[in-house]
């Protein structure tokens, strides 16, 4: 059966019953039908004095274009925790429509390790992405409206920094001219769209600690500069109140369940290649109050999601992970060994030997943060015993504990060994520390990430990037952490440099201040904040039958 067929055959438990497992009361839920709910502020107030559980992060090695099953492993691990008698909750990101209609599919797991209702989650869910899109575009509309009606703030239209956004991969919108159509059509200017997951509003939403913090962060979004070079913030346009109103309900974390009835909190959805790649602080904090183990996930490999989780999310929110699960697959290792993606399902020990260095790099990366580590070897049907034995031997030789993960085919029963080892790892002392001191100069922070995490020999900066750096320093914002946007397929900024490349430099082509989010974004290589669809997008396979049943989602 396909993922969606498995999900559709699952007998769902009413969400109020799932909430009871976590000790949540019915009046602490805002119900979205029978199987979805938002958890409201009264639960946060009641639980505020409760001791936190242990925070477990799931990350991965550099993936194939199809992804390596981090969400599947996360879900399977949560289900396995229940199997061994542990009280666990999963805290995940919400899927964007972009991957659903592009290459990767959704973000609800797969096989017997899925979050349900799968169709709702992978499509409109509870409307959070729509709210974030609307809040972002409201600010854009207010900027252009302000300019049209006299431009009291003296905004230079050439210096507007907030792109419009849309929850869809649409390369046609990367660069355009807007405001055409004469005097009533606005002031013509160059404009752009990013995908909603890459917007600063998404980052603000995920890092906000509550309504007041949300409003303050939204007001701190750097919107533009004046003709005199002075900064203009969202609060100068009086936009933050209305933006907060649009996000008020979305800010409540979403509660759903896995196929086996394990509670799952899904909230926020930034991509880790072009944003900070973690679910909301609110959802993570809630999970830590509700269970002994909160299992969360950061996007793509440890060079992206995990680094940003540690250096941005944990630093800004005061979180301390107890353990890290590093997902590895034989096919991704072979891909890093030079095997084309469509041939990674065949045994190839030579490619495995060549690409295993990528796993070594990610093991080394995690150790630098001082957090206990378990490698989860996510088993695929095509994997051979020889391939799995080779990966296990490598883990053993590199001082990393490991376990097979078979959540896709077996659900929770396929992850009990992993769950036991994660509990042991989380019981060890964690010496967690961020990679760098945020007070260092911007170039030093970028240089530290490039050298320590990517293995680069140095960093080159374009003139545009250097100009942006000076502007950020002039605003006094240079002591913020750095969020590097780069390709997910390589440790470098070149997607073709696979394995564990050496002798390379990364190029920072631009930077901008995400003042509301509280970090500096540095764009490495040719990374785009508005992806495009492939030649044959997943949307071609999606359909709805006469009875209303969706097919083709994965």
Image (tube, rainbow, N blue to C red):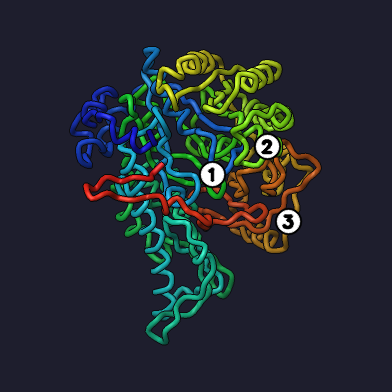
Q: CA distance from mark 2 to mark 1?
A: 20 Å
Residue 369: x, y in percent?
62, 28
Q: CA distance from mark 3 to mark 2?
A: 27 Å
* Mark 3 lies on residue: 461
Mark 1 closeness class: few <14, some 14–19, many ≥20 residues within 10 Å:
many
| Lateral position of residue 239 relative to residue 61, left or right | left
Q: Nearer the viewer, mark 3 or mark 1?
A: 1
For the residues carrying marks 2 and 1, which lies nearer the camera in this image?
2
Q: Is residue 80 above or below residue 233?
A: above
Examine the rendering and report whether any part of residue 542 can be seen.
yes
* Residue under label 1: 272
Any part of residue 217 in sight: no
Dot 2: few (<14), some (14–19), or many (≥20) neighbours within 10 Å? Answer: many
Is 178 drawn above or below residue 339 in the view shown? below
Residue with the most extreme right position: 503
Q: Is residue 389 left or right of residue 35?
A: right
Counting residues from the start of the chain, the first of labels 3 and 2 encountered is 2
Q: Nearer the viewer, residue 449 or 413?
A: 413
Residue 473 percent coordinates (x, y)? 64, 56
Measured from the top left, where is residue 261 in percent x and y? Answer: 30, 25
In the image, 82: left or right of 42? right
Q: Is residue 225 above or below residue 241?
A: below
Which quadrant, please, contains the N terminus? top left
Which residue carries the number 2 mark?
336
Does the residue at mark 3 contact the one at mark 1 (Cβ under 8 Å)? no
Name the residue at 58% across, 20% down: 372
Q: Residue at x 49, y 59 (%)?
A: 194
Q: What secondary structure is marked by label 3?
A: strand
N-terminal label among 3 and 1 = 1
């Amino acid at each position: 059966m396909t993922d969606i067929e498995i999900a559709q055959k699952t007998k769902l438990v009413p969400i109020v019953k799932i909430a009871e497992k976590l000790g949540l009361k019915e009046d602490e839920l805002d119900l979205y039908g029978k199987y979805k709910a938002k958890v409201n502020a009264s639960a946060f107030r009641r639980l505020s004095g409760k001791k936190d559980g242990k925070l477990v992060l799931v990350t991965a090695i550099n993936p194939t274009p199809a992804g390596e099953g981090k969400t599947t492993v996360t879900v399977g691990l949560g289900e396995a925790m229940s199997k061994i008698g542990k009280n666990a909750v999963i805290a995940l990101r919400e899927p964007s429509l972009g991957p659903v209609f592009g290459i990767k599919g959704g973000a609800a797991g797969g096989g017997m390790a899925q979050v349900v209702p799968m169709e709702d989650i992978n499509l409109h869910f509870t409307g959070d992405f729509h709210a974030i899109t609307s809040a972002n575009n409201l600010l854009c509309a207010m900027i252009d409206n302000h300019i049209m009606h006299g431009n009291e703030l003296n905004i230079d239209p050439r210096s507007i920094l907030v792109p419009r956004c849309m929850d869809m991969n649409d390369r046609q919108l990367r660069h355009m001219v807007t405001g055409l159509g004469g005097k009533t059509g606005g002031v013509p200017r160059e404009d752009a769209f990013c995908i909603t997951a890459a917007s600063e509003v998404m980052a603000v939403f995920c890092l906000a600690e509550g309504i007041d913090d949300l409003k303050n962060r939204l007001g701190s979004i750097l919107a533009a500069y004046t003709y005199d070079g002075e900064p203009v913030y969202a609060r100068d346009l009086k936009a933050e109140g209305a933006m907060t109103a649009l996000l008020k309900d979305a800010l409540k974390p979403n509660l759903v369940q896995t196929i086996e009835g394990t509670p799952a909190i899904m909230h926020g959805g930034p991509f880790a290649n072009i944003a900070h790649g973690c679910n909301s602080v609110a959802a993570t904090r809630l999970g830590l109050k509700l269970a002994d183990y909160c299992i969360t996930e950061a996007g793509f490999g440890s060079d992206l999601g995990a680094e940003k989780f540690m250096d941005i999310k944990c630093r800004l929110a005061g979180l301390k992970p107890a353990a890290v699960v590093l997902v590895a697959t034989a096919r991704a290792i072979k891909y890093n060994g030079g095997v084309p993606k469509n041939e990674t399902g065949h045994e190839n020990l030579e490619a495995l030997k060549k690409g295993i260095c990528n796993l070594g790099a990610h093991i080394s990366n995690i150790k630098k943060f001082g957090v206990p580590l378990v490698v989860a070897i996510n088993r695929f049907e095509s994997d051979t015993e020889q391939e799995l034995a080779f990966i296990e031997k490598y883990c053993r030789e590199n001082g990393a504990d490991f376990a097979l993960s078979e959540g896709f085919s077996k659900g929770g029963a396929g992850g009990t060994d992993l769950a036991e080892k994660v509990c042991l790892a989380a019981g060890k002392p964690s010496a967690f520390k961020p990679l760098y001191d945020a007070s260092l100069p911007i170039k030093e922070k970028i240089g530290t990430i490039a050298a320590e995490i990517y293995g680069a020999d140095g960093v080159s900066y374009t003139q545009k990037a250097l100009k942006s750096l000076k502007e950020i320093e002039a605003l006094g914002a240079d002591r913020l952490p750095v969020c590097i946007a780069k390709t997910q397929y390589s440790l470098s900024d070149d997607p073709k440099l696979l394995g564990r490349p050496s002798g390379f430099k990364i190029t920072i082509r631009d930077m901008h201040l995400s003042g509301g989010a509280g970090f500096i974004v540095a764009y490495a290589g040719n990374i785009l904040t508005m992806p495009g669809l492939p030649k044959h997008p997943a949307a071609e396979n999606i359909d709805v039958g006469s009875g209303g049943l969706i097919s083709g989602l994965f």
